[in-house]
């Protein structure tokens, strides 16, 4: 009888206690979590929220690209830049131009074609072919540059080193979220010093990205460590005797010796239009060696 009474009492106690115990972890924990999140987010400005969404979107895109690389998928991209003035490594290559790019990559390997087309026939037309490999932040590649104005007949399928217009270049570099360091050296094609020796024209570039005032900024400095390829060219100059006169001058692709040939600052604002990204940028581009400066405006068209 005592055992029966004891069991009955324990059963009654459990029935009375269980409902309270079940409610405590379920009903009180959820409201507490919501209450804590509300004040934490309420202090963020609209711009900070937008920046966070953009960062999350970028991280998601990076994860997707990394996943495609690991899964062995072929990734293809296409985009185009429209710029008011084309300046390449400190070299003035004409005014308004359209610069399309198409790339195919697989497990770090990539092949890319890019170029530049001016709206006027006398401006430089350019076609660049790239083949390379990326691993983490490191990259290595080779390129074939072809531009008009070097060969008198502007022949593309003509690879003579002295009279053709092709230049073959090797590139190695490293990029991370804090900086990008790239080195380029021309090893073949049309690349000779004024004395006729091969120049091995070299260009080294350091880029530092940062974010300020809801804009993406890029500070870039480019230099050559030695004499680059050069040529004699007829240049129009103003003189005391005549307002304009043709002068035969020595002109180098980069510089006649170690020099800083590019110092630039670019700010970019990315606009999202449906299934298309539209970064708009303004850039102050200078060449300290030539004492030149250009203010450039442009936009990029990048489908999702």
Image: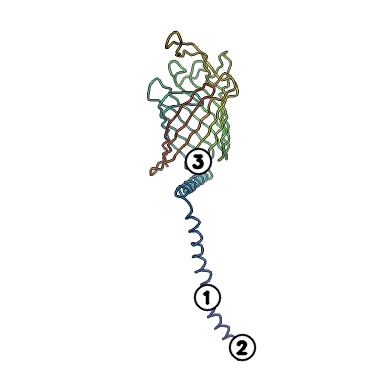
Q: Nearer the viewer, residue 244 or 17?
A: 244
Q: Residues within 10 Å of mark 3 (few under 14, many from 20)?
A: few
* Distance between mark 1 and mark 2 Cα atoms: 27 Å
Residue 206: percent from the left, percent from the top? 56, 32
| Residue 286 image label | none
> Please, what secondary structure does the residue beneath circle 2 have?
helix
| Residue 3 image label | 2
* Distance between mark 3 and mark 1 Cα atoms: 53 Å
Most distant residue in the right direction: 2
Residue 60: percent from the left, percent from the top? 49, 47
Q: Nearer the viewer, residue 199 or 254?
A: 254
> Please, what secondary structure does the residue beneath circle 3 have?
strand
Residue matched to label 3: 212
Q: Is residue 222 above or below residue 36?
A: above
Q: Of the residues under marks 3 and 1, which one precedes in the sequence?
A: 1
* Distance between mark 2 and mark 3 Cα atoms: 77 Å
Q: Is residue 26 above or below residue 184?
A: below
Please identify the quadrant where the C terminus is shown. Answer: top left
Residue 169 image-quadrant placement: top right
> Please, what secondary structure does the residue beneath circle 1 have?
helix
Q: Nearer the viewer, residue 104 or 249?
A: 249
Residue matched to label 1: 20
Which-is-in-front pick, marks 3 and 1? 3
Q: Residues within 10 Å of mark 1 (few under 14, many from 20)?
A: few
């Amino acid at each position: 009888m005592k055992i029966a009474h004891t069991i009955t009492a324990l059963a009654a106690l459990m029935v009375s206690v269980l409902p309270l115990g079940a409610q405590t972890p379920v009903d009180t924990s959820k409201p507490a979590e919501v209450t804590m999140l509300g004040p934490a987010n309420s202090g963020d400005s609209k711009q900070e929220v937008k920046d966070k969404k953009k960062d999350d979107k970028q991280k998601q895109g990076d994860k997707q690209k990394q996943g495609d690389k690991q899964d062995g998928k072929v990734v293809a991209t296409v985009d185009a830049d429209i710029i008011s003035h084309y300046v390449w490594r400190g070299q003035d290559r004409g005014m308004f131009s359209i610069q399309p790019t198409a790339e195919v990559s697989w497990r770090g390997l990539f092949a890319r074609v890019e170029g530049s087309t001016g709206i006027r026939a006398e401006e430089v037309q350019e076609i660049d072919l790239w083949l390379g490999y990326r691993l983490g932040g490191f990259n290595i590649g080779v390129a074939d540059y072809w531009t008009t104005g070097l060969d008198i007949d502007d022949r593309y399928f003509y690879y003579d080193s002295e009279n053709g217009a092709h230049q073959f270049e090797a590139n190695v570099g490293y990029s991370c979220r804090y900086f990008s360091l790239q080195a380029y050296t021309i090893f073949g094609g049309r690349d000779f010093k004024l004395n006729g020796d091969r120049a091995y024209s070299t260009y080294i570039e350091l880029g530092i990205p940062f974010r300020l005032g809801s804009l993406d900024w890029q500070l870039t400095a480019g230099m050559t460590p030695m004499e680059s390829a050069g040529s004699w060219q007829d240049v129009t100059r103003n003189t005391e005797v005549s307002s304009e006169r043709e002068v035969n001058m020595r002109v180098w692709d980069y510089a006649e010796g170690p020099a800083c040939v590019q110092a630039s600052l670019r700010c970019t604002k990315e606009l999202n239009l449906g299934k298309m990204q539209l970064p708009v940028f303004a850039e102050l581009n200078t060449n300290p060696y030539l004492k030149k400066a250009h203010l450039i405006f442009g936009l990029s068209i990048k489908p999702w």
